[in-house]
Image (tube, rainbow, N blue to C red):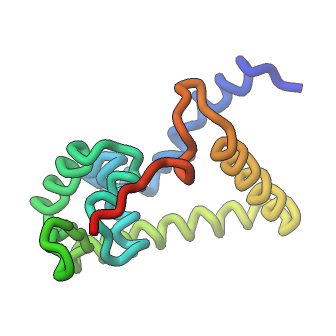
């Protein structure tokens, strides 16, 4: 059984290989992790509101606004006003933003295929189930900071 200290050291020694693999470094992305997350959420939901984007990134609206400002300046996102309610700002990917996300997805799929290459089918499925179980476990329990899990956060709909 590994101690918490040993697990911490192992993760710290190897986190760069998982979070920012060498192949992604070669892409020379000039994006912060929150900018990348905003792009991925915009791609997932096609058109999303600033409020939903902020909630999805777990950041205040002011922070999300700054992130979107930078991505608009880089030509990766565009802002529009909702036709139903002009107070609501929507965000969508531009063509360049969509191309960037597709490129990143190709790299992500490469890493998944690479993992499938050195794990048996059963090991791969077990690994996915374990990651899923850990994520769901964190969503169900309160954190040390007494934050509510994402699904329990209050959302106010503007009508």
Q: In this view, does 139 lie above or below 91?
A: above
Name the side, left or right, on which 21 lies relative to 8: left
Q: Quadrant of residue 68?
A: bottom left
Name the side, left or right, on which 80 lies relative to 8: left
Query: Going 79% across and 62% down the picture, which residue do you hit?
Result: 124
Query: Going 14% across and 61% down the picture, which residue do you hit?
Result: 74
Q: Position of residue 93 (x, y in %)?
A: 26, 73
Query: Going 69% across and 61% down the picture, which residue do you hit?
Result: 115
Query: Going 56% across and 53% down the picture, which residue do you hit?
Result: 151
Using the image as rendered, state which of residue 137 and residue 87 is in the foreground.
87
Q: Position of residue 131 (x, y in %)?
A: 71, 51
The quadrant the C terminus occupies is: bottom left
Q: In this view, does 94 lie above or below 70?
A: below
Name the side, left or right, on which 70 lies relative to 132: left
Q: Where is residue 82 in the image (x, y as percent from the top left)?
A: 19, 76
Using the image as rendered, state which of residue 137 and residue 147 is in the foreground.
147
The residue sitting at the left extreme is 73
């Amino acid at each position: 059984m590994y101690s918490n200290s040993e697990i911490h050291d192992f993760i710290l020694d190897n986190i760069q290989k998982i979070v920012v693999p060498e192949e992604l470094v070669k892409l020379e992305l000039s994006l912060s992790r929150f900018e990348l997350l905003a792009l991925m959420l915009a791609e997932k939901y096609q058109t999303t509101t600033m409020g939903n984007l902020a909630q999805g990134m777990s950041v205040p609206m002011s922070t999300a606004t700054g992130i979107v400002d930078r991505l608009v300046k880089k030509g990766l996102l565009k802002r529009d006003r909702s036709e139903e309610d002009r107070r609501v700002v929507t965000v969508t990917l531009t063509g360049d933003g969509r191309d960037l996300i597709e490129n990143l997805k190709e790299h992500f799929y490469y890493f998944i295929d690479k993992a499938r290459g050195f794990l048996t089918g059963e090991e791969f499925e077990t690994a996915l189930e374990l990651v899923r179980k850990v994520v769901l476990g964190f969503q169900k329990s309160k954190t040390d900071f007494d934050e509510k899990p994402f699904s329990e956060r209050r959302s106010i709909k503007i009508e």
